[in-house]
Image: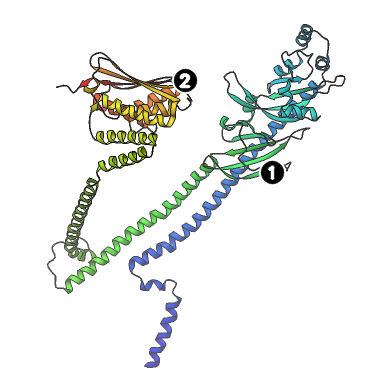
Amino acid sequence: MKIHKDSKKKIKEPFSRQSPLGFLRNANIKQQLYTIYVLAILIPIALIGSFLLVNTSRLLMNYHRDLLESDNLRVKTILFEITTQLYNLSEEISFDNTIQDILSQSGMPSSEQLNVIDRNPVLENYVYTHSEIEEIMVYTDNPNVVEYKQYYYADDEIQQTGWYEKAIQTASVFWTEMESFDRYQNSYWNLCLVRRIPMVQSDYHAVLVIRLSDNYLKTRVNSSEYQTYISADQGKIFYSSDKKVSGGEQFVDIDYEDRYFQYAGDETIDGRNCFVRVSALPLYQSDTKLYISTWSESSYESIQRIIYICAAIIIVALVIPGVVVYSYTQFFTGRVLTLRHVMHQVSNEEYDYKQMVQGKDELSEAFADLEVMVQKIKAKDAEVYETRLMEKELINEQQKMEFKMLASQINPHFLYNTLETIRMKAFTAGDREVATAIKLLGKSMRYVLENTGTNFTTLDKELEHVRTYMEIQKLRFGERFNYFIEIDEDIRAGHCEMLPLLLQPIVENAIVHGMEQVQEGGTIRITVVCDGEDKLLITVEDNGSGMDEETLEGLRKRLRETAVKRVSSIGLCNINQRINLCYGEEYGLHISSIPGCGTKITVKIPKKSDDV
């Protein structure tokens, strides 16, 4: 018999070790179901989904990089075509006999020179027939040539420019960026061809400058999807999809020694990750190289959007089976646990079952016995939860009381006494300016603290606070501005009620923004007049830099918006809203401004008196 038992063990153990799911034998039912979900669904879908996400991301990145490279090549092709055409035109212009005669003459009267230029409009014809040319200019140091149309005298200022000196010293063509201004004095940049015109029979020099049209370049180069920056050699950016960048530097480190420089990578531009492609374009018959930077600000977002969608699909594919498995696990294990509790109740001789779950299986019949205990447990849990909430509320109330007790112990007079002590020490030390500043600061703090939480003050107290504030500011700005306060003689300022702390933010706005560009002679004028018998008009006017119509209209619009929508001009908007809420929509702020002349803000409030 002993040998027979040992043989049984030898048969069972190999069978147990060979079972692929033998480790589940020691796990409960919930763990078994979750393990099957992890092994059969979660891990396979996660592995396959991760592979698809990585592969899709790589393919999309390669796709967008190829598109970016194609657009960069397109821009290079356009620029090479345009610059080569301009070079050929410069060859024709440089060796044109009429132009040579005009630049080489020495004794021809001015009127005859004008007639010759008008009869031979060679340069004008080139500008008219070639839309890519914005302007053709010929500079010469021949004083006998009259300045007319495309012909200019190269004075000392022109001759000292880098491009003119380089053109005189070298015979080859080169390209450079030049800044120009339109009729509104807005600056813009152009790519210009510069070359020396050979003067064979003359001791004078002449330099040809052909300015490439920026608008023509935009129509040929601009792309709705890609941004392009172009610069010449180590110069500034002369063409940009964003005008703000024109005249700036390339955002990628460039090896200018490499004639065929290429760069492709990822860069952070304006806080956004972008694909970037930079390449050098050596120009035809010139040592100049153009550096073309092409980048896309939406490619990363497009890729991320697709990846997010794919990831969301994978997550849904994991969540839905997970929810089903979880729901069934909860349902099944709940029934098993119900049976366990019923058996426990029976073992404790608790047979008075009140509710039964309808069903045909044993678990459904046993679940009814558990319902009573579950209800009791829930009731007790609810009581415990309510008790905890009450305890937390008591603790919070206690903390609030302790905080109020601590806050009430802070005596504002301590601050005033401390400032007064510091002022007396400064006064004793002979520093009257510091003593005055401390006195004004304490006076201003007292007014703010006294009116915090109050509804109304008087006009004279408010104006006195403004006067104190401006005296403090004059300690900072010195004689850069003066202020004047004028009150209509019919107004009794000491009896006129108004909301406290209305005028100081307006005066502060006038000093910070209006006096910012004023170095001397600044004036802030505060006037108080009656508008009829029941309204007061308080005007704060400065002679500062003012605002243009667009900025002014934007500020007026923000004053009309609700507090939720405002993101700037909080002080003025706050004042306007306080007035509207207290007095009604017919009262508030009115703002007018003239650029270069100043800004005027008028506060319209009702005329209220505290007379009994």
Q: Position of residue 564 (x, y in %)?
A: 34, 34
Quarter in which the N terminus is drawn:
bottom left
Q: Which residue is mark 2?
A: 595
Along the horizontal axis of the image, is 559 left or right of 535? Answer: right
**Can you tell which quarter of the image residue 149 is in?**
top right
Toward the viewer: 455 or 337? 455
| Secondary element at image label 1 | loop
Residue 400 percent coordinates (x, y): 22, 49
Residue 340 rendering spot, x and y as whole percentages = 24, 69
Residue shown at the point (66%, 36%) measured from the top left: 292
Q: Residue at x 70, y 16 (%)?
A: 128
**Quadrant in which the C terminus is drawn:** top left
Q: Which residue is at a point 30% across and 29% down the rendered structure image?
A: 465
Q: Nearer the viewer, mark 2 or mark 1?
A: 2
Q: Look at 37% across and 73% down and name the residue there.
A: 25
Which residue sits furthest top? Answer: 111
Number of numbered discs: 2
Instruction: Depth check: give the residue in front, 87 or 518.
Output: 518
Q: Is residue 554 visible from the viewing direction of this image?
A: yes
Q: Nearer the viewer, residue 140 or 329?
A: 140
Bin the neighbour count of mark 1 within 10 Å (Cα to Cα): few under 14, some 14-19, many 20 and up. few
In the image: residue 172, left or right of residue 601: right
Q: Which structural element holds mark 2? A: loop
Q: Are marks 2 and 1 in contact (CB under 8 Å)?
A: no
* Label 2 Cα neighbours within 10 Å, binned few <14 / some 14-19 / many ≥20: some
Label 1 belongs to which residue?
A: 255
Horizontally, residue 161 falls left or right of residue 311, namely right
- Looking at the image, tell me whether mark 2 or mark 1 is earlier in sequence order: 1
Q: Compute the Cα span from label 2 to label 1.
A: 46 Å
- Residue 540 can be seen in this image: no
Q: Amino acid at mark 2?
A: Pro
